[in-house]
Amino acid sequence: MTWDMAQNIKNYLSHTPWIPATDSCHKTLGQTTLDLWLISLEHPLQVDVLSEDEIDRLNRYRFAKDQRKFAVARSSLRRILARYSQLDPANLCFDYGPHGKPFLRGNDSLQFNLSHSGEYALCGVARVAVGVDIEQLRLMDRLDGLIKRCLALSEQNALATMSIDQQSVGFLQYWTCKEAYLKATGQGISESLMAIEVDLANEPQLKIPGQSWQLQIVKPREGYTAAIVMPPTITQTRFWSY
């Protein structure tokens, strides 16, 4: 492998131009458009729009900071989806797939996915299935074992020539891509991560036999990376700040 993966990762992680959402953005979400929403979780805990099952989930968190992050992420998701569905955020009902992927009850035309890490959440909204994953960049514990269990051989070889801190960034880069794919397909983390091969040599792409998905890598904020997996029919991505 002759390319410098560390430099490629740095290039992928250029800043993304998040802008305040327009009042009419929900009216212009077409079949070929993906709306990405970056959500800051640094807000007080609010539960006014959460359902009973969401409050039950919130109460399972031991620490107040984790309760706050969950509550802000879920209430923000409800308010974002309320724009598109033109319903009260508290009245939205979610159902869940076999591996836990949520979808709106009674609204097949609106697809979404939510991920959060550190003090940010990322939400993708489209008319077709989409998967998103965000991770705060950090040094990983037990990195060697994670690399062997989660990465394809080509990916392991790509990380082998890097320093430890670069390997942590590289691993999280691969991880977000694989997670976003599993969330787009609704398969869940139980599927083999090693079977999902990510190519970062030139333009990021998924190498999965018989399937065609777009892979996009963005830098939501300094110290974070995110990946989005979507069908090839998506031709426009809009970056909204919430």
Image (cartoon, rainbow, N blue to C red):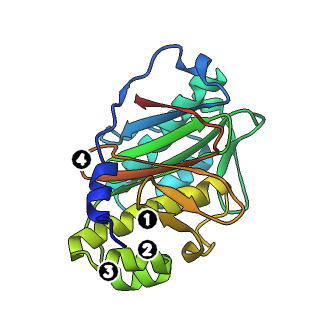
Q: Which residue is mark 1?
A: 174
| Label 4 secondary element | loop
* Marks 2 and 1 close (CB-CB < 8 Å): yes
Q: Does 123 sit above or below residue 7?
A: above
Q: Is the residue marked by circle 1 packed among few (<14), some (14-19), or many (20+) residues within 10 Å?
A: many
Residue depicted at x 39% and y 38% = 39
Residue 9 image-quadrant placement = bottom left
- The quadrant of the rendering that contains the C terminus is top left
Q: Earlier in the sequence, mark 1 or mark 4?
A: 1
Secondary structure of residue under mark 2: helix
User: Label 4 to label 3, Cα distance in Å?
Assistant: 25 Å
Q: CA distance from mark 2 to mark 4?
A: 24 Å
Find disc 2 in the rendering and name its residue.
155
| Residue 222 disc label | 4
Image quadrant in which you'd find residue 125: top right
Pick the residue in front: 215 or 223: 215
User: Dot 4 surroundings within 10 Å: few (below 14), some, or many (20 or more)?
Assistant: few
What residue would you read off at disc 3?
Answer: 160
Q: CA distance from mark 1 to mark 4?
A: 18 Å
Amino acid under label 4? Glu
| Residue 137: image location, x then y, percent | 29, 60
**Nearer the viewer's eye, disc 2 or disc 4?**
2
What crowding class fits label 3: few (fewer than 14 Cα within 10 Å), some (14-19), or many (20 or more)? few
Give the mark, 1 or 3, whose residue is nearer the N terminus: 3
**Residue 240: x, y in percent?**
42, 29
Residue type highlighted by circle 3 = Ala
Q: Residue at x 65, y 49 (%)?
A: 102
